Image (tube, rainbow, N blue to C red):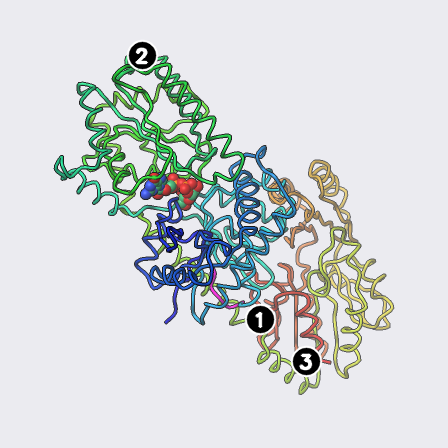
C-alpha cells in the first residue's frame, strides 16, 4: 500500500541516553506539534534525525535506537557530531534562520557549513530513497532541507513531492544577498507543490524565482522546462480539539488533582483580591520572538500605568533552544538581566512582576498557563505563523481572554479579532495591554467566538488534507502535459509518417526552438549542430524545410543566406526560396515607423534593459532583460499608449515571449504557412515552435499536420517537447 513519507530535520520524538538506556521524549516546537497529529492518524512514516549523533551510541544500543524509532513509525537519518555542527547549528541556524527572519546582521555565510548542509541533505535523500516505494508521496518540511526535493527528483523523477516552509520566505532584496541563492531555489523547485503559511511569503518566493532563475510564472505556477511547480499558501492550523478538550478536563479537576503550577497560580490569583491578572507569553528562546521587546514594553507599561503594579503579572515561559549558537547565548543573558532588572525595580513583598521559566513544561502545565491567563502577549519581531496564539484561543473554554499579537506573525493575517500590535512600538503595546486588561467580558467573548470557530474549522488536519489534495491535483496537471508529450511511441509514429510520405514540408521556428534565447538577440547565431540537423533534413528527397521566424530579413540573410533552405521572416512579411531573391508575401509598408518609433524609444529610455529592434516592416520592443514586474507593467502601459495610433494605421500588436511587436495587420506565421501549402499537395506537414506567434501557425495548418510546442505552455499544438535538446533529438530522428 502506498504511504506518505514525512521528512523533517527533527523527528516528533527525541532520543536520549540515560543510565545506559535509550529514552524517548517528545519534541517541542511548531512543526513537531502540528505534524504529530497528522502522522498519528495516517499511514505514514516519518524520516528525520533522532537527536543522537553517531558518536553518542555504540553498536549495543543501535537496536534500542531503531526499536524506539520504529515504535513511532520513524526512521532515523544517521548524522555525526560534525554534521550537526555544520548543517544544523551552522548553515540552518546561523545563516538561513536569521536571513529568512530579516536578521541580516546575524547572518553568517561559511563555505564549510554550506558544504555540510549539502552533504547532509544528500544523507536525508539516501535514507528516503531506500524507503521509497512506487506510489508513495513525499512531504518535506522546512528550511533545513531546502535542497532535498531536487535530490529526490533527480533519482526518482516520477515521485510526487510536496514541500512546506514553516518560516517566512523573505523578500527578494534580502534573499538575493545569500551566495548560494540559485542552488537553494533550484533545490526547492524539485517539488511539485511548495507551500507557505501566507500569501506574502508565497509572493516573495515567486519573485525570487523569477528574478534569480528567470523562470516564467503564470499566476502561482512556475513553468520549468519539463514540469510545472505549483506554489500556494496554506496557513497551518492546530489540533484544536486536543487543546480545547484538555482545557475542559483541566477546568473540571478538583483542587487536589491540580498540578503544582496550577496551585501556585491559584495563590497568586487570590492574593490580588479578584484584581490579579496573569499575562502569558510562551516561546522558544529565540531572538525572532521579540522577548526583549516584550519585557521592555511591560516595564514601560508598569511605569505608565502604576495602577497595575501588584496586580498584573507576566508569566513568561521561554523554552531553551539552539543553545550552541552564540546569538542565543547572548540573548539568554540579555533576557536574564532584563527580568532581573524589572523584578528588582517593581517587586513587592507579596508580588513579583515577572514569573520567568527557562525550561520546557509538560503539556498539562501548558494548559494550566493557557487556561489561567487573562491575556496572552505574543510579540515576535518575525514569525512564520505562531501556533501559541492559536493554542491560547483554543484553550479558552469560557471564551474569555484577550490575545495581543504581533503583526509580524503569519497568524495575525487570520486572527484579525485579536489586538494586533507592532512589536517595536512600546507605547502601543503598553496601551494595548491596558486596553486588554480592561476589555469588557462581552467583547472578549465576541472576539474569541469568531476566532474559535475559524480555528476549529481550519485545524491542522484540514491544513494537511488541503495540502495533500493540492499535491494530488498537481499530478493531474502534470499528466495533462505528459499525455501530449512526444515519447518514443509518438516519435515513432511521426517518423514512420515522414518516411512513407512523398511530399514533406517542415515549418521550424528559430529562437527558443532551434537555439536558446540570448541576452542580446544578435548573439543567438546558429550553431554547427543546428546546421548539421538542417542540412541532413534538407538533403532528404522531396523535403522542404522552412525557417519561419519573426526575425528581420537582414539577420536571417546573413545567417542562412548561404544555404538553400526556404526562409520566412518578420512573421510572414518576407519569403526567400532557393535560388530566388527575397519577395514580399504581403502588402506591407513602414511609413508609420515615424509615429510609433519615438514612443517606443521613450519607453526604452525609462525602462532599463529594454531595447527597440527595427525590422524592415515592423518594430519590436524587447523587455527580456527588464525586471520582470516592471517589464510587464511597462508592456501593458505601452499597449494602452499606442492603441489609438495603431488602429489609425491599420497595425496590430503581436505579443511574443517578452517582446511586443508592432506590424501591419494581417501578417502572421499562420497566413504565410498556409500560403506555402498552396503550391503543392503535401502529405507530411510538420510545425514546431515555442512562442505565442507560433500558435497562429498551429491553428491555421490542416488537422493532418503534426504540430509541436516547445515548453509546457498552453497551446493548440498536438504535442509537446520539453526543450531545445528534445527539438534537436526529434529532428535528428528524421535523418
Ligand atoms: C516554527 C515557526 C510556525 C512551546 N513551549 C512548550 C511547548 N511549546 C509548543 C507550543 C507550540 C510550539 O511549541 C511552538 O510553535 P510556534 O509556532 O509558536 O513556534 P516555532 O517553534 O518557532 O515554530 C513558527 C511553526 O514552525 C509551525 O509552522 O508557527 O512560525 O517558527 O505548539 O505549544 N510544548 C510543550 N512544552 C513547552 O514548554 N509541551
> Residue 126: image x %, image y %?
53, 64
The correct choice, above or below, for 656 with respect to 200 in the image is below
> Residue 505: image x %, image y %?
70, 76
> Residue 729: image x %, image y %?
68, 73
Distance of label 3 from label 2 (alpha carbons): 94 Å
Magenta part, dominant SS? loop
Q: Judge the density around disc 3: few (<14), some (14-19), many (≥20) Cα neighbours within 10 Å.
A: some
Q: Which mark is residue 682?
A: 3
Relative to 38, 91 lies left or right? right
Q: Earlier in the sequence, mark 1 or mark 3?
A: 3
Q: Earlier in the sequence, mark 3 or mark 2?
A: 2
Front residue of 156/545: it is: 156
Q: Quadrant of residue 506?
A: bottom right
Q: Quadrant of residue 435?
A: top left
- Residue underneath mark 1: 719
At horizontal 37% and vertical 14% (from top left) the residue drawn is: 345
Dividing the image into four equal quarters, which quarter contains ligand 1?
top left
**Is residue 379 at least partly visible in the picture?**
yes
Relative to 713, 529 lies left or right? right
- Residue underneath mark 2: 306
Q: Name the residue at the bottom extreme.
A: 500
Q: Quadrant of residue 72?
A: bottom left
Bounds of the magenta segment: 157-161
Q: Is residue 677 magenta?
A: no
Task: Identify the secondary structure beneath mark 1.
Answer: strand
Amino acid at each position: 500500500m502506498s504511504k506518505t513519507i514525512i521528512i523533517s530535520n527533527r523527528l516528533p520524538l527525541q532520543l536520549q541516553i540515560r543510565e545506559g538506556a535509550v529514552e524517548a521524549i517528545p519534541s517541542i516546537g511548531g512543526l513537531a506539534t502540528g505534524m504529530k497529529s497528522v502522522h498519528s492518524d495516517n499511514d505514514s512514516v516519518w524520516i528525520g534525525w533522532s537527536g543522537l549523533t553517531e558518536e553518542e551510541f555504540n553498536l549495543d544500543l543501535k537496536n534500542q535506537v531503531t526499536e524506539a524509532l520504529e515504535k513511532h513509525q520513524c526512521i532515523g537519518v544517521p548524522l555525526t557530531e560534525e554534521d550537526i555542527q555544520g548543517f544544523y547549528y551552522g548553515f540552518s541556524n546561523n545563516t538561513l534562520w536569521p536571513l529568512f527572519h530579516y536578521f541580516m546582521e546575524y547572518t553568517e555565510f561559511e563555505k564549510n557549513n554550506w558544504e555540510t548542509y549539502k552533504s547532509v541533505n544528500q544523507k536525508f535523500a539516501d535514507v528516503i530513497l531506500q524507503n521509497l516505494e512506487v506510489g508513495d508521496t513525499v512531504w518535506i518540511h522546512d528550511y533545513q532541507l531546502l535542497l532535498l526535493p531536487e535530490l529526490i527528483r533527480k533519482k526518482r523523477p516520477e515521485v510526487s513531492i510536496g514541500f512546506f516552509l514553516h518560516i517566512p520566505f523573505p523578500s527578494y532584496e534580502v534573499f538575493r544577498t545569500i551566495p548560494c541563492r540559485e542552488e537553494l531555489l533550484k533545490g526547492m523547485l524539485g517539488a511539485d507543490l511548495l507551500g507557505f503559511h501566507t500569501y506574502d511569503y508565497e509572493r516573495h518566493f515567486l519573485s525570487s524565482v523569477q528574478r534569480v532563475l528567470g523562470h516564467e510564472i503564470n499566476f502561482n505556477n512556475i513553468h520549468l522546462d519539463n514540469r510545472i511547480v505549483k506554489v500556494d499558501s496554506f496557513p497551518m492550523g492546530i489540533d484544536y480539539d486536543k487543546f480545547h478538550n484538555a482545557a475542559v478536563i483541566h477546568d473540571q479537576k478538583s483542587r487536589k488533582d491540580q498540578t503544582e503550577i496550577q496551585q501556585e497560580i491559584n495563590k497568586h490569583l487570590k492574593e490580588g483580591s479578584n484584581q490579579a491578572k496573569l499575562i502569558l507569553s510562551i516561546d522558544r528562546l529565540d531572538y525572532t520572538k521579540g522577548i526583549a521587546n516584550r519585557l521592555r514594553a511591560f516595564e514601560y507599561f508598569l511605569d505608565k500605568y502604576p495602577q497595575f503594579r501588584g496586580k498584573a503579572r507576566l508569566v513568561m515561559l521561554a523554552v531553551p533552544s539552539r543553545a550552541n549558537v552564540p546569538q542565543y547565548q547572548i540573548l539568554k543573558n540579555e533576557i536574564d538581566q532584563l527580568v532581573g532588572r524589572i523584578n528588582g525595580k517593581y517587586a513587592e513583598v507579596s508580588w513579583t512582576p515577572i514569573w520567568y521559566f527557562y525550561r520546557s513544561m509538560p503539556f498539562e502545565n501548558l494548559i494550566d498557563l493557557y487556561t489561567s491567563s487573562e491575556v496572552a502577549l505574543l510579540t515576535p519581531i518575525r514569525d512564520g505563523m505562531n501556533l501559541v496564539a492559536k493554542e491560547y484561543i483554543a484553550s479558552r473554554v469560557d471564551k474569555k481572554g484577550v490575545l495581543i499579537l504581533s503583526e509580524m506573525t503569519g497568524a495575525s493575517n487570520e486572527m484579525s479579532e485579536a489586538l494586533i500590535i507592532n512589536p517595536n512600538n512600546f507605547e502601543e503595546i503598553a496601551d494595548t495591554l491596558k486596553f486588554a486588561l480592561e476589555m469588557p467580558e462581552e467583547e472578549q467573548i465576541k472576539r474569541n467566538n469568531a476566532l474559535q470557530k475559524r480555528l476549529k474549522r481550519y485545524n491542522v488536519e484540514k491544513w494537511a488534507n488541503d495540502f495533500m489534495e493540492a499535491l494530488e491535483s498537481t499530478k493531474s496537471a502534470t499528466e495533462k502535459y505528459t499525455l501530449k508529450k512526444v515519447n518514443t511511441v509518438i516519435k515513432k509514429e511521426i517518423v514512420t509518417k515522414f518516411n512513407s510520405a512523398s511530399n514533406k514540408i517542415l515549418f521550424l521556428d528559430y529562437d527558443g526552438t532551434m537555439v536558446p534565447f540570448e541576452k542580446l538577440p544578435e548573439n543567438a547565431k546558429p550553431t554547427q549542430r543546428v546546421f548539421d540537423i538542417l542540412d541532413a533534413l534538407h538533403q532528404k528527397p522531396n523535403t522542404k524545410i522552412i525557417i519561419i521566424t519573426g526575425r528581420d530579413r537582414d539577420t536571417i540573410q546573413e545567417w542562412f543566406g548561404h544555404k538553400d533552405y526556404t526562409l520566412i521572416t518578420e512573421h510572414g512579411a518576407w519569403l526567400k526560396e532557393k535560388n530566388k531573391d527575397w519577395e514580399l508575401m504581403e502588402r506591407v509598408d513602414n511609413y508609420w515607423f515615424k509615429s510609433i518609433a519615438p514612443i517606443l524609444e521613450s519607453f526604452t529610455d525609462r525602462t532599463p534593459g529594454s531595447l527597440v529592434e527595427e525590422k524592415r516592416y515592423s518594430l519590436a520592443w524587447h523587455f527580456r532583460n527588464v525586471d520582470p514586474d516592471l517589464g510587464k507593467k511597462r508592456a501593458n502601459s505601452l499597449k494602452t499608449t499606442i492603441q489609438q495610433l495603431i488602429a489609425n494605421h491599420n497595425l496590430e500588436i503581436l505579443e511574443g515571449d517578452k517582446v511586443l511587436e508592432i506590424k501591419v495587420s494581417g501578417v502572421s506565421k499562420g497566413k504565410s504557412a498556409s500560403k506555402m501549402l498552396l503550391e503543392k499537395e503535401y502529405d507530411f506537414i510538420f510545425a514546431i515552435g515555442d512562442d505565442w506567434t507560433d500558435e497562429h501557425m498551429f491553428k491555421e495548418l490542416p488537422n493532418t499536420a503534426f504540430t509541436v510546442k516547445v515548453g509546457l505552455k498552453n497551446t493548440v499544438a498536438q504535442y509537446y517537447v520539453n526543450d531545445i535538446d528534445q527539438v534537436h533529438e526529434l529532428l535528428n530522428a528524421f535523418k
